[in-house]
Amino acid sequence: MRIIIRVLVNAFALWLTTLIVGGPGQHGIWIVPIQDDTWGNIATLVLVALVFGLVNATLGKVVRFVSIPLYILTLGLFGLIVNGIMIAVVAWLSELAGFGLTVETFWWGVLAALVLSILAGILNGLLGTSKKKDDRR
């Protein structure tokens, strides 16, 4: 149940990110919906959030492990670049599917990754889905 809530929270954070970083028109980062109605937009956001979670859980762990020296050298700032790469991978997969996330340039993806991580962290913190519950309390 917690995983479903986290995917929905990430979908909402992704929607807010497209509003903040994308702005009006098609520049920055935006969503290409499955259908041009409300449910098509919601379904697209949930699918993109699910794909983003899967990419982070698989490819993200490998990239983060390989780039440990760069994390140490840049005092963790390289994490923004890694998250931008993950957003670029999700945008590429979305392009293959014909709908989903679209990113204009890599640096828009890095900015979107920063905004998305801040918003998702705040929302997960407010809802209490950020940490596993300790059963021993």
Image (spheres, rainbow, N blue to C red):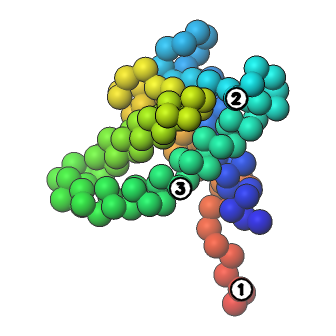
Amino acid carrying label 2: it is Ile
Q: Which residue is mark 1?
A: 135
Tell me if I can see residue 33 in this picture: yes
- Looking at the image, residue 109 sits to the left or right of residue 65; the answer is right
Q: Return the residue at label 3.
A: 54
> Which amino acid type is shown beneath numbered disc 3?
Leu
N-terminal-most mark, 2 or 1: 2
Residue marked by disc 2: 34
Task: Say which amino acid is labelled 1.
Answer: Asp
How far apart, in angstroms, are the residues tagged by discs 2 and 1? 41 Å
Residue at image location 24% in from the left, 60% down from the top:
66
Identify the image quadrant of the C terminus: bottom right
Q: Earlier in the sequence, mark 2 or mark 3?
A: 2
Question: Does the image show residue 114?
Answer: no
Judged from this view, the residue extending furthest toward the top is 25
In the depicted structure, whether residue 112 falls above or below residue 54 = above
Earlier in the chain: of badge 1 and badge 3, it is 3
Cα separation between marks 2 and 3: 20 Å
Where disc 3 sits, the SS reads helix
Real-space CA distance between mark 1 and mark 3, rounded to the nearest whole angstrom? 27 Å
Give the mark toward the camera: 2 or 1: 2
Q: Position of residue 81 (x, y in %)?
A: 32, 41
User: Where is 22 relative to 11, above or below?
Assistant: above
Q: Is residue 135 toward the left or the right of residue 74 in the image?
A: right
Query: Which residue occupies the extreme bottom position in the image?
Result: 136
Q: Residue at x 40, y 55 (%)?
A: 60
Q: Nearer the viewer, residue 65 or 69?
A: 65
In which image quadrant can residue 48 be found?
A: top right
